[in-house]
Image: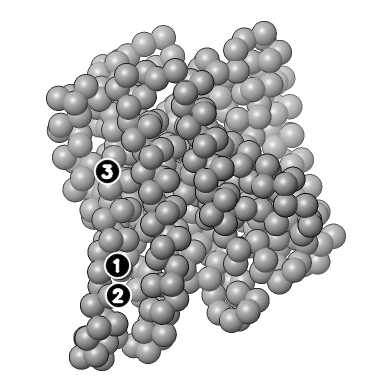
Amino acid sequence: MFSALIVIFFVAFFLSLLICRQVRYFAPYWGLVDQPGERKIHTKPIPTGGGLGIGMSVLITFAFCQICIILLMNFETLRLLFPATIIVHFDGLIYRSGQLWILLGLSFILLMLGTLDDRFNLNWKFRLGVHFLVAVIAVYHGWRLTIFIDAPIFTNILSVLWIVGLINSFNMLDNMNGLSGGVAVICGLFLAVVMFIVPNPLSQQPQFFVAGFLFVLVGAIAGFLLYNNPFHASIFMGNGGAYFIGFLLATSTLTATFADYSGALQTIYVPLLVFAIPVYDTTTVLLIRISNGKSLFIGDKNHFSHRLVDLGFSRTQSVLTVYLTTTICCLGSLLLYQVNFLGASLIFLQTFLLLFLIGIIEYVGRK
C-alpha cells in the first residue's frame, strides 16, 4: 500500500511541475502578476497563480485515481495486476469518493476566490465571508472536531474557526519565497506519518485514506516548490494557493478517524503541535497589530519571518529557520501515542515554552 502512496505522490508532483510551468507562462496574459510594492520583498514583477498549478494537479490526480479504481473494479483481469493489499481498499475508496469530491469542490471555490483576489484585489469582508461559508458547509458535511466533548454547537463553532484560522494562517505565511509551501509540506508529511503509526480503532489498520490524501497534496506543493523556494522564485502561489492548502490541511485534521483514534485525550494535541508555527505566526502578528493600533486586516511586515530578518537573518536563512522550527514542533506529534495524557501535556507544554522563548528573544532583539 505504501508503494501506491508513493506513486500518487509522484503523479501529483509531476502534474504540478508541468501545470505550474504553463501557468507561469500564461499568468501575465491573465493579469496574474505581483508587482513590487511597499510590503513586497521582490524588486521586479513576478507571475502569480501558482496555486492553480497546485490545485489542478490535486484535482486531476484524484480524478485519475478514481477512474483507475472504477476500471479495476469492473475488469477482473486488471485486478490481477495488483496485490490484494491494495484491492481490499477499493470498496472503501469508492464509498468515500462522494465525500472526497465535496471537499475538493469546496477547496476549488477557495482556489478561485483567491485567484480572483490576486487579479482584482477583492474586499477583505467578502473574502472572509466566503471563508466562513465554505467552513460551515464543510462542518455540515462531517469535518468537525470532537475533542471528547458532548456539545455539538460548541465543537461545530470551534471547527469553523479552526478551518478559517488555518486558511488565513497559510495565507499570512505566504510572505517570503517558499515559506508557506515549505511549511505546508512539513506539516502534511508529519500528519501523514501520524496516520501510519496510529491505527484506526475499528479496523486496526493505518489511516490509508487520509495518508493518501495528504501524499497527493504534499506532492502537488513539492512540484510548485521547484519554482518557488527559499533560493529562487519564478512564480508565486498567490492567495488562491494559500487558501487551497490551508483549507485541505485543516480539514485533514477533522476527519473522524483522526479525531477518534483510541479515545485517548492526547489526540487533541496533534493538530496544535503540527500547526504550531502557523498559529504562532498568526497570533503574534495579530497581537502586534492590536498593540500598534493597526487594522487586523491590513498586511504588514511583522510576521515571524520578517522579525527574523530584523534580527539579522537573511531572507533565505529566515525561511530555513522557520522550516526548522516547524519540524521541531511537529516531532512532538509522533510521540503523543507513546505516552499518557500527562506525558502528552508535557510535550505540548514544552512546545509552548519553546515558542514563548522565541517570542522573548525576538522582543529583546527588536528592542
Above/below status of 325 relative to 216: above
Tell me which numbered mark, 2 or 3, is placed earlier along the sequence. 3
Q: Is residue 342 visible?
A: yes
Q: Is residue 328 left or right of residue 342?
A: left
Q: Which amino acid is tagged 3?
A: Gly
Above/below status of 90 relative to 236: below
Residue 245: image x %, image y %? 44, 44
Q: Is residue 237 visible?
A: no
Residue 274: image x %, image y %? 60, 50
Tell me which numbered mark, 3 or 1, is placed earlier along the sequence. 3
Instruction: Say whether marks 2 and 3 touch (CB < 8 Å).
Output: no
C-alpha separation, residue under disc 2 versus residue under disc 3: 24 Å
Residue 122: image x %, image y %? 39, 20
Q: Which mark is residue 65?
A: 1
Tell me what residue is drawn at x 55 percent, y 35 percent.
Answer: 132
Task: State how the image is colored.
Answer: one colour
Q: Is residue 51 left or right of residue 125?
A: left
Query: Which of label 2 and label 3 is nearer to you?
Result: 2
C-alpha separation, residue under disc 1 versus residue under disc 2: 6 Å
- Name the residue carrying label 2: 69
Q: Which amino acid is tagged 2?
A: Ile
Tell me what residue is drawn at x 29 percent, y 82 percent.
Answer: 73
Helix, strand or loop at label 2? It is helix
Q: Which mark is residue 53?
A: 3
